[in-house]
Each structure stands twice: as C-alpha cells, then as structure tokens.
Image (cartoon, helix red, strand yellow):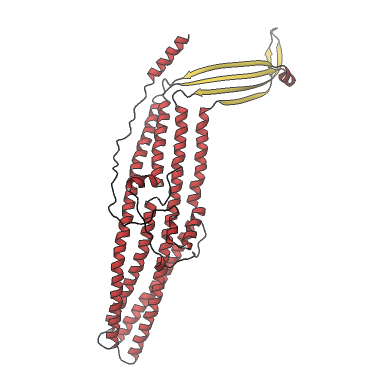
Amino acid sequence: MKRAALAALAALLAGCSLPRHPAPAPTLQMPAHWRTAVGPGAPVERDWWQAFHDPALANLVQQALARNADVRTAQARLQEYLARITVAASGQWPMLTASGGPSRAEAIGSTGSPTVVTSVTAGVQASYELDVFGRAAATTRAARLDYQSQLALADATALSVAANTANGYLNLRGLDAQLELARATLVSRRRSLDLARRQFEVGYSSRLELAQAEAEYRTTAGVVPQLERSIALQENALALLAGANPGVVARGLPLAELAPPAIAPWLPSQLVRRRPDVAAAESAVAAADASLAVARDQLLPSIRISAALSGAGSNLPELLSNPTALWSIGGSILAPVFDAGRLRAQTDIAASVRDRAVFAYEATVRTAFAETDNALASIRRLGEQIVEADARRVAAAEALRIAHNRYANGYASYLEELDAQRNLFTAEQTVLQLRAGLLGAHVDLYRALGGGWAPAR
C-alpha cells in the first residue's frame, strides 16, 4: 500500500512539468562617470534643504512632509502591505477551528418507529499544508518584497514633495525679487515721464518723446500686476503642497542672500543604490520573480494533513462530564490534472509581470542617470550664463548713464535713453531669473541624487 502511494506521487510529479520562463537579457550599461562635473563640494545630507540656510524654507518643507496628502497616503499604504505579509505568512502555519452546538433530529430507530435524538457536540479541527515545494515561503517572500517596494516608494514620494516645495519656494523668492525690481523701475519710469512732460510743456521736446515716455511707463506698470498674479498662484501651489489652505507664505532670506550649496555628486554606481525609486523598482523585480515562483508551484501537487477531535453528549452536563469522544486524522494529495490551461496561463501572466518589472527597473535607472546629468549640466551652464548676464547688466547700466547724460545735454533724442532703460530692465530681470533657476537646478540635483534618502529598509 505504501509503495503504491509513493508510485502514484511519483507519477503525479512526473506529469507536472514546469514551464521555463527565463528572465530577459539585461540591456543596462553602467556609465563610468558623468558628462558634466561641477567641482568638489559637500556630500548630500538627508535634510538637504537645510543647506540653503533659510529657516522659512526649512519650515515649509517640514510642514509639507508632515501634512502633504500624497506623503500621508504613501505612509498609510504601508500598513496595508504589512497586513499582506501577515496574510501571506499565515499559510505556513496550521489552521485551527472550533465548532459546537446543540442539535435535535427525528430518525428511524432500530424498532422501525420514529425516535427523537437530542445531542450537544463540541470539537476542534486542525489542517496543515506541507510546504514541500516552498510555495508558502515564496508567497511570504513576495509579500515582504512588495512591502520593501512600497517603503521605497514612500521615500520617493517624500523626496518629490520636498523637492517640489523647495523649488516652489525658490521660484517664489525669484518672483519677489522681480516684483521688487519692477516696482523700483516703475518709480524711475515715473520720474522720466514727469521730466518728459515738463520738457514738453516748456517746448524743449516734442509730443512724440512724451508719448514714448508714457508708453514705457505703462509697459512697466503692466509688469507689476502680472508678477503679483504669479506670486499669488505660486503661494497657493505651495500651500497645497504643505497641506494648508491658500494664503500668504512666510518668507525668509531674499534671493540675493540665497547661495547655492556645494554638492559632490556621487558616481553612477552609487546613485543606483541611493535613489528610492530605483530601490522600489529593484524590489518590484524581486517581488515579481517570487510571485512567478508561486505561480509555477501551483502546477505541483499539494499535500494536506487534517485532524479533528470532538465530543458529544445528549445534553450539556453529559458533554462536560462524560462525553463520547470522536476523532479523525487523515491526509490528502491534490494535484492538477486538467484545468483547460488555467494554471499555465497564470504562470505566463506572472512571467510577463516579472519581465515588465525588469524593463521598468532599467528605465528607472536610465532616468536617474539622465536626471543627474541634466541637473549637473544645468548648474554648470546656468553659472556661466549668470556671469555673462551680470556683465551685460553692468554694461547696460553704463549705457543708460551715458544715454541719460547725452539726452540731458541735448546730444541725443529721448528714444536713445528709452532703449537703454529697456535694455537695463531686461538685463536685470534676466539675472534674477537665472539666479532663481540656478538655485532650482541645485534642488533638481538633490532630487536626482536621491536627496539623502537611503534605500528601503
């Protein structure tokens, strides 16, 4: 009998040929270095926004990390995946159930006449599936890897929210600086308009020059409400990121005092281990591979052992004092014989999910390389642009001084001074925009380098 059972089990195993699903060939190549270097600097810290030394920025980022809806949602999702680990791990333990209750039935007795039987039963049943092929362990491992992936995604969400908040704040300070410049320029344009009006009234200049001065004043005046609108929209966006109602955002250091921090970018191989989205993609590949193993194991037989112990009596006192004991123990082997290809199709689905996870991982790593290189290139080129733009601003200021003196002494028309005023205003705006852009590029580099977040624990 024992030999017959073993022979049947061997026949079942021989008939359960597992399909092969090799992983796709890797296409990812690790670059040896970045295309652009920005020079030596300080390492990336976890609370990297502190490197800007602006208390208002630090408070805003901390508020966003504590109250942002996306961050809180990602943290809440972790509780779900922790519970999934418990659900998966429960398959590696026996299941115990208890039952009991009274019953009353009418049956045909030994004399052929109806007999009413009353009984009270109570019992315990146990069942356990032997994890011969490691299916339960693989299910638990897949659940743990899913949790690791979600943990890394929560870090990636926090990094994104912190970077978006910092970028929005720096953009706000850039808009504030441009508004301050526009208002100061508007005062200067007002003086020029008053001068042109007085000269026209005394017959020193023509109506054309007066009209040109007024047009330039109105143009500058139109910039002020445009910037005020942009500031209001940026403040509302920041309030939304920080989980607050729309309103005024507290300011700290002005744009001129916000110096870009020094950063020493990591090597490409180190970057792969730092970024939380890369860690999440890597865990997703491992989880998909474990799920594929579970799907393949569904094609193998399952061995289950069950046992039951119960007691019965005609009433509750009898059940408690002198019950009739009943027991059973047994085992079963369940193997798929015909399911119209359902289990093999599920295995193919799991293999496709694993392959897509591999492709997504490679795409995530390449994106990390590109974002880091883009940020490094932006920092270097924006720094060079600022040098040229600042030189242009100095030259434009000198050109305006000369044009004003020529106009005041009657050697040139007012149009020459107007052109010089416009050129200086444009040059000053460009410098402010580039400075804000350079600060934002540093935030982008912090984001690209992983922002100090470690891989999933």
Give coordinates of residue 198: x percent, y percent.
Answer: 36, 89
Instruction: Please identify the quarter of the rendering in which residue 231 is found.
Output: bottom left
Q: Nearer the viewer, residue 366 or 11?
A: 366
Residue 342 can be seen in this image? no
Judge left or right: residue 312 versus residue 5.
right
Q: Nearer the viewer, residue 264 or 129?
A: 264
In the depicted structure, whether residue 137 falls above or below residue 29: above
**What residue is drawn where x is 51% and y is 28%?**
92
Judge left or right: residue 314 versus residue 40.
right
Residue at the extreme left of the image, as rendered: 411
Give coordinates of residue 405: x percent, y percent.
Answer: 29, 85
In the depicted structure, whether residue 91 falls above or below residue 385: above
In the depicted structure, whether residue 245 falls above or below residue 389: above
Residue at the extreme bottom of the image, as rendered: 202
In the depicted structure, whether residue 443 falls above or below residue 320: below
Give coordinates of residue 300: x percent, y percent.
Answer: 42, 23
Instruction: Please identify the quarter of the rendering in which residue 319 is found.
Output: top right
Give coordinates of residue 90: x percent, y percent.
Answer: 53, 30
**What residue is drawn where x is 28% and y is 47%?**
32
Instruction: Please identify the quarter of the rendering in which residue 403 is found.
Output: bottom left
Q: Nearer the viewer, residue 61 or 19?
A: 61
Number of marks drawn: 0
Residue 10 can be seen in this image? yes
Residue at the extreme right of the image, as rendered: 317
